[in-house]
Image: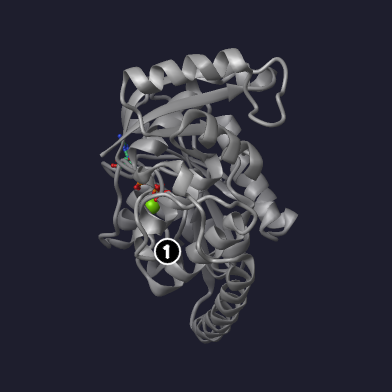
Amino acid sequence: MTNGIIINLITNKNDLINKDYNLNEIVNLSKTLKIKCKSSFSIRINKFYSSTLLSKGKLSELKDIISNKSIDLLVCNYLLTPSQQKNLEKFLNIKVIDRTGLIIEIFADRALTSEGKLQVELANLNYRKSRLVRAWTHLERQRGGQSFIGGPGELQIELDRRLIQERINSLKKDLKKIIKRRDNQRSNRKKNVNTSYALVGYTNSGKSTLFNKLTKKNEYAKDELFATLDTKISKLFLPSKKATIIDTVGFISNIPTQLIDAFKATLEEVNESDILINVVDINDMNFRDKIRTTKKTLLSTGVSDDKVKNMITVFNKIDTFSNRKFKNTKSRVYLSALNGLGVEEFRDILSSSY
Ligand SMILES: Nc1nc2c(ncn2[C@@H]2O[C@H](COP(=O)(O)OP(=O)(O)OP(=O)(O)O)[C@@H](O)[C@H]2O)c(=O)[nH]1
Ligand SMILES: [Mg+2]
């Protein structure tokens, strides 16, 4: 167990409005990596200090908390430049990880298939090639290295950039082969299928639970951010046609571009689906932002405007929502994937309208 201090930076009005929400999200992300949150708070940044991001005063405050609470990791909900990360580590004398690094670590922890593992390794190397700091925990263990606890003074990566680049090139080659194989599988599948659906949406919205309910499968669904990383495909029984449905990785705001680039093989399954189903947690006070994030992410991975516009929105988790008056339309459906309320109506809509 690592003792962590988790800070959320406020740099604009939007960050200010969502400060509690964002702090809670980064704390939850940290928890998925078994980081024990000893202290967490938001810091408003009025002036940027380019070398350490934070003022001397703030740094001293952090240093006090770090020594009082025996903290060995700082998680910063921000994208740090390589030199900011290095300078913060030097000054605070503990390991520092930013939002991108944290999310990549979570993906590394979750990746099960060889495809998932290759994609995470590629994302990680792209992220780290400009950073002369070691990765933390999982990715470190994977290479058989020592943990960071020895102190940041020793934290020099052994691989030089040339070696990293060579590995990136070879991973890209392997992934190209996977993409090709997937292409072939997909075109074979398409011959026997009328419509392919893909579940998309923010992490933890209930995609895997809905997938299980619709297909009677038992995919990993858990109250955990990024429970699913790899794409699962299944037949979907509809009275009117032959259909398939896929369950895939969830999105998050400020998703690292390295991950988007590396997860091409996984995301291509989404791009190639006929109809997208955006699963939204209706109880989430920030669901509008999350819908925006999902749309933005889809567009950035090359999904067409039309497909995003024609996406079906499923408002999930109505079992725990106080207002019970829901009116389904063709493109807006209310249901509970957990207890099944509204799921058969949803199947009828898919069968008759899409
Ligand atoms: N109350 C309630 N909880 C639900 C419902 N659907 C899903 N959940 C819970 O929400 C949590 C996340 O569900 P998942 O199905 O794993 O969510 P996901 O969208 O696949 O998440 P990622 O794979 O992390 O992107 C789990 O604890 C589910 O039991 C629902 O209809 N009602
Ligand atoms: Mg899932």
For the question of whether residue 326 can be seen, the reply is: no
- Badge 1 density bin: few <14, some 14–19, many ≥20, Cα 10 Å: many
Tell me if 101 is positioned left or right of 161 in this view.
left
Up/down of 347 relative to 84, above or below: below
- Quadrant where the N terminus is found in the figure: top left
Please give the name of the residue rendered at 43% of the width and 51% of the height, measured from the top-left corner: 105
Q: Quadrant of residue 39?
A: top left
Tell me if 50 is positioned left or right of 91 in this view.
right
Up/down of 176 relative to 235, above or below: below
Is 104 or 19 nearer to us in this picture? 104
Please give the name of the residue rendered at 35% of the width and 43% of the height, measured from the top-left corner: 149
* Element type at mark 1: loop
Is 37 or 225 nearer to us in this picture? 37
Please give the name of the residue rendered at 58% of the width and 60% of the height, measured from the top-left corner: 275
| Place of residue 74 in the rendered image (x, y in percent of width and height, measured from the top left) | 45, 32
Please give the name of the residue rendered at 31% of the width and 26% of the height, measured from the top-left corner: 70
Tell me if 332 is positioned left or right of 319 in this view.
right
For the question of whether residue 350 can be seen, the reply is: yes
Q: Identify which amino acid the numbered label 1 is placed on.
A: Asp
How many marks can you see? 1
- Quadrant where the C terminus is found in the figure: bottom right
Is 69 or 18 nearer to us in this picture? 69
| Place of residue 53 in the rendered image (x, y in percent of width and height, measured from the top left) | 65, 27
| Place of residue 20 in the rendered image (x, y in percent of width and height, measured from the top left) | 49, 18
Residue of label 1:
230
Residue at the front extreme?
A: 153
| Place of residue 190 in the rendered image (x, y in percent of width and height, measured from the top left) | 54, 80
Up/down of 50 relative to 305, above or below: above
